Amino acid sequence: MNVKLCALVLALLLLAGCGASVSVEKTEPIDFYFCAAEETEQTIDFERPSGALSVQTVDLGRQDISIGEILTRYLAFCRDGGYGPFPAGLEYTDLALEDGVLALTFNDAFSALSGVDLSLAAAALTMTLTQISGVDGVSIHGRSAILSGDWQEVFTADDFLLQDGSAVHPEYAVQLYFLDAGGNLTAQRRVLTCDDRSQLPELAMDALLAGPDEPGLTCAVPAGTQLADVSVDGALCTVVLSEEFAACDTDEASAQAAVRAVVLTLCSIEPVERVQLQLLGGAGLQYCAIDASIAPDSAWLE
């Protein structure tokens, strides 16, 4: 397993700022997740129950407590214990809870985090705060340029895989498109693990061809279709599929659904905006033109 570390996250804050009055009802003790002071990237124990992070259960002592107070207690715990990976001077400047997402805004001190420390900070904060009743996910906002990278906008506890005996690999969320019971294309979110983001188009196609993992969905791409090649040049992704793909060419609806599923899936990955679909042997399709590159259309999902 891998320390899932996608991304950005934040550390918590020492001061109770705007939004700290958001109240929740917390009746159970809370687990504070952190990095032990003596641990480094090389000495992290991925085999313990909490994986890459250490954990300590803390009794908040009150039933009615604000999220701002919980953040303050958490940060003080990490600061006083010398625990990481949060940088000195980190503060949150705003806090808001809406539709289960806790939005936190941080000052520029957050830019001191990078690499594994950045990922561990994301995991520690998310794992801690999503225990609060009403908090299903955490979104991070900040003034640092590092926050504008390829990160998810909302983190949940399920986004982090903290037990691993091998290495730390980033994970990325993509959208795979399958047919629902009504024959309409619908997106299924899938998290893919890779060391290099350039591998995402290939991994996404492999996942699409393997089919959905949720009941009620079916693959628009014909069974037996194999990925021969995929490459990205700027905003254009060229994908080469085996001749089995042509089995979709029985009518307009089937051909369009298969082609659009491929295009929508690949265009969910930045910076892809258009897809050139090719079949081994150079064959085309009768019911859906693939001789030119195709850009996704929102009308496909209506």
Image (cartoon, grey):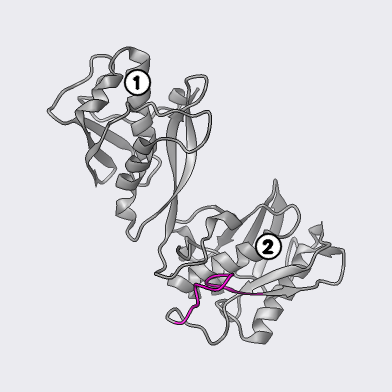
Q: Given the current orientation, which residue lies at the most extreme top position?
A: 251
Q: Answer above or below: position of 42 versus 238.
A: below
Q: What element carries label 2?
A: helix
Q: Is the magenta stretch mostly helix, strand or loop?
A: loop
Left or right: residue 79 compared with residue 295: right
Q: Which residue occupies 80% across, 73% down?
A: 59
Q: Name the residue under label 1.
A: 256
Q: Is residue 262 in view from this perspective?
A: yes
The residue type indicated by label 2 comes to: Leu
Count residues near mark 2 (Cα–Cα under 10 Å), then give few for <14, some for 14-19, many for 20+.
Answer: many
Left or right: residue 128 compared with residue 266: right
Q: Which residue occupies 44% across, 78% down?
A: 41
Residue 139 image position (x, y, % from top left): 60, 56
Q: Mark 2 points at which residue?
A: 129
Residue 229 image position (x, y, % from top left): 21, 41
> Is residue 48 inside the magenta stretch?
yes
> Is residue 142 inside the magenta stretch?
no
Q: Answer above or below: position of 5 versus 181.
A: below
Q: Which residue occupies 80% across, 64% down?
A: 28
The stretch in magenta equals 43-55
Q: Is mark 1 on a helix, strand or loop?
A: helix
- Quadrant of image for the N terminus: bottom left
Q: Is residue 10 in view from this perspective?
A: no
Please state which of residues 111 and 195 is positioned toward the viewer in this rendering: 195
> Which of the 4 quarters of the picture holds residue 56?
bottom right
Q: Answer above or below: position of 263 versus 59.
A: above
Q: Answer above or below: position of 273 versus 148.
A: above
Q: Which residue occupies 71% across, 53% down?
A: 97
